[in-house]
Image (tube, rainbow, N blue to C red):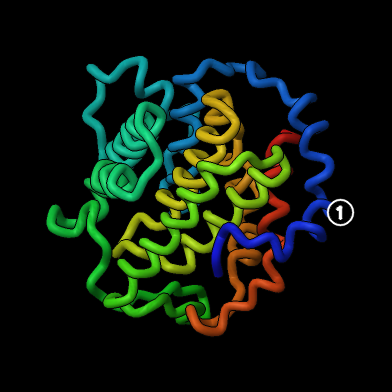
Amino acid sequence: MRINEKKYLPEYLKIIGNEIPTLFENFNFSKGKGNFEYLTKASAVYSSNIEGNSIDLNSFMNYGLSKEKFKPGKEIEEIENLVKAYEFAQQNELNETNLLTCHRILSKTLLIKSKRGRYRIEQVGVFGKSGLTYLAVEPELVEREMKQLFSNISKLAEETITMPEVFYFTSLIHLVFVHIHPFRDGNGRAARLLEKWFIAEKLGKEFWKIPSEEYYKKHQEEYYRTLDLGVNYYELNYDNCLGFLSMLPNCLKI
């Protein structure tokens, strides 16, 4: 799947795309505790929660106010590393090299040093309660698929596209990245960061504030269900992708 294709765009626009400018206009970027630092931490917490981290946002923020009183555990360190990865992305251009740097930062507690910021050399799958639910592309093909993905991202970065199109392509980037599953671990965290990185580069830094990770966490069952388009990389049916693509705009309704 080439993420710069517009095959599903007309139907996407009918379902939700045409609503996006209005949703954006009504979205309050300073809602609640809406400062940039707080929302970056919130993004990291919710993204970690999706992967099973048990530290909630309130606990993480309270820890930050009194670090000298507590020794951070692995889950706290995991979130702190992801915050650092978001901060790096916010200050740097979106490209393949910088994404690998982000992965190296966020995976410090997830992987041994030799596997951080490097594409996997193992065959990997996604497992559910009933066993293996998805088998990713072979490790020897990962780099090729990632080069193709970033080639498409670069082309989109140079194009002038509408706000609904930005959301559409952003979600496709997230979807294709997850299906490639390029890392031994940390793929979900990296995918959600990459999604927000692209939309912020196209629409402005304020878009780092949109609560996409929070929305995915609150609708986690739907998130995983709509990511599931086939049992392996070669049997993915992107004709069923609109369920997932519709999720990102809905985060503007929070």
Question: In this rendering, does residue 41 appear at all?
Answer: yes
Q: Residue flagged by tag 1: what amino acid is it?
A: Lys
Within the image, what quadrant is residue 249 found in? top right
Within the image, what quadrant is residue 48 found in? top left
Figure quadrant of the N terminus: bottom right
Residue 247 spot, x, y in % from top left: 69, 50
Q: Which of the pair 8/68 is nearer the observer?
A: 8
Q: Residue at x 25, y 75 (%)?
A: 122
Figure quadrant of the C terminus: top right
Residue at the extreme left: 114
Q: Which of the pair 10/68 is nearer the observer?
A: 10
Residue 10 spot, x, y in % from top left: 80, 58
Q: How many labels does the image show?
A: 1
Residue 137 spot, x, y in % from top left: 39, 77
Number of other residues with Cα within 10 Å of mark 1, as a class: few under 14, some 14 to 19, many 20 or more: few
Q: Residue at x 47, y 39 (%)?
A: 197
Q: Which of the pair 128/180 is nearer the observer?
A: 180
Tell me: 2 left or right of 246. Answer: left
Residue at the extreme right: 14
Relative to 59, say whether 150 is above or below.
Answer: below
Residue 117 spot, x, y in % from top left: 24, 52
Q: Which residue is drawn at 62% across and 58% down?
A: 223
Tell me: 164 left or right of 153. Answer: right
Q: Residue at x 48, y 78 (%)?
A: 233
Question: In this rendering, does residue 46 appear at all?
Answer: no
Within the image, what quadrant is residue 147 found in? bottom left
| Residue marked by disc 1 | 14
Q: Which of the pair 163/129 is nearer the observer?
A: 163
Task: Tell me the element at label 1.
Answer: helix
Relative to 160, say whether 185 is above or below.
Answer: below
